[in-house]
Image: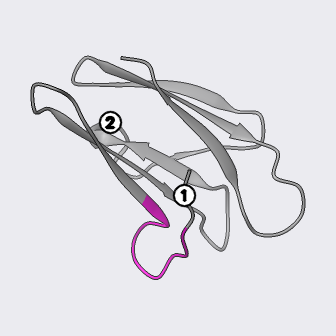
Amino acid sequence: MGSGKATELYDLKANVIYPKGMHVNVWGKNPAVGRPHVGVGAVTRGGEGFSVGDSKTFTQYNHSFTVIRHYEGHGDSKRFKIRVNS
């Protein structure tokens, strides 16, 4: 779980590191206009826009990630679940 404010390129950024040293960057951004975006590694350089209820599975370097956007209620915050499948 994390939160952020877009003072830089991303609101949130994480680096998933696997036992053999492979790493995959996962990031999120909530632009002032348009849908919030999530990016997984090099697969989504510009990110993928998500509406409430959208889900998508990304594969990067033979590792799978599922992103689900949840309803967030009122306010500017956005809720996502990002599951590392493998």
x%, y% of residue 84? 43, 27
- Count residues near mark 2 (Cα–Cα under 10 Å), then give few for <14, some for 14-19, many for 20+: few
The C terminus lies in quadrant: top left
Quarter of image, res 19: top left
Residue 11 left/right relative to 69: left
Residue type indicated by callout 1: Gly
Residue 22 left/right relative to 35: left
- Point out the tag, 1 or 2, that comes first from the N-terminus: 1
- SS at mark 1? loop
Residue named by callout 2: 43
Q: In the rendered structure, does residue 8 fall within the stretch colored magenta?
A: yes
Quarter of image, res 85: top left
x%, y% of residue 71? 82, 45
Residue type indicated by callout 2: Val
Q: Which residues are magenta?
A: 4-12
Which is nearer the eye, 86 or 76? 86
Which is nearer the eye, 80 or 18? 18
Q: Main secondary structure of the magenta part?
A: loop
Residue named by callout 1: 2
Q: In the rendered structure, does residue 60 fall within the stretch colored magenta?
A: no
Which is nearer the eye, 17 or 59? 17
**Marking on residue 19:** none
